[in-house]
Image: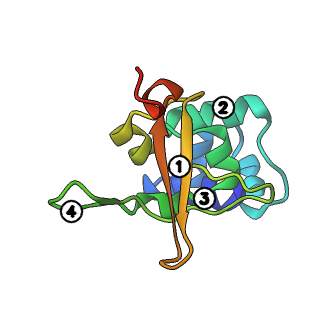
Amino acid sequence: MIASNIKYLRKKESLSQEEFAERFGVSRQSVAKWENGESAPDVFKCREIADYYDISIDELMNVPVEEEDTKIETTDGKYIFGMVKVGDRGQVVIPKHAREVFGIKPGDRLMVMGDTNKGGIAFAKVSFGNMFGKD
């Protein structure tokens, strides 16, 4: 996933591998190997790339970032934020735009709800206080 994400982010800005390499202080050959999946950037370089593109390291490594670009807002305050992929252990990365709209921050608690008849699942930001009529 990281290989295709790095390639996508580079091409999104119309950068050559050489220009991308200069931006992050590595060789063009390193970028080529990253994009071909022959190697991966170290954790410090991942942090630098993720910070530059305003995504998390988890998103850089595990979530197809090109899918996150789908953002549709309707006039009634409902959104389509794009596609997410469920990880091997059930983890879901909520797209950045959705986190911004709903003010979701690391450590927040989300309630997961579902409707098997409609085939839908939803998340709601809650605190224990407002769940029981207290705040």
Element marked by disc 4: loop
The image shows residue 46 at horizontal and vertical percentages of: 69, 37
Whichever of labels 1 and 2 marks the residue nearer the N terminus, that label is: 2
- The residue tagged 4 is 74
Which quadrant does the C terminus fall into? top left
Task: Report which residue position mark 3 lands on.
Answer: 7
Residue 104 numbered mark, or none: none
Gap between marks 1 and 4 measured at Cα: 19 Å
Q: What amino acid is at disc 4?
A: Thr
Q: Residue at x 80, y 55 (%)?
A: 89
Looking at the rendered structure, the kind of residue marked 1 is: Ile
Quick one: which residue is furthest to the front in this view? Answer: 133
Q: Pointer 3: residues within 10 angstroms few (<14), some, or many (20+)?
A: some
Residue 120's x, y, as percent?
50, 70
Residue tagged by mark 1? 94
Depth check: give the residue in front, 81 or 20.
Answer: 81
Which is nearer the N-term, disc 3 or disc 4? 3
Q: Nearer the viewer, mark 3 or mark 4?
A: 4
CB under 8 Å between discs 1 and 4: no
Q: Are marks 1 and 3 in contact (CB under 8 Å)?
A: no
Pointer 3 or 2: first along the chain: 3
In the picture, the disc for residue 47 is 2
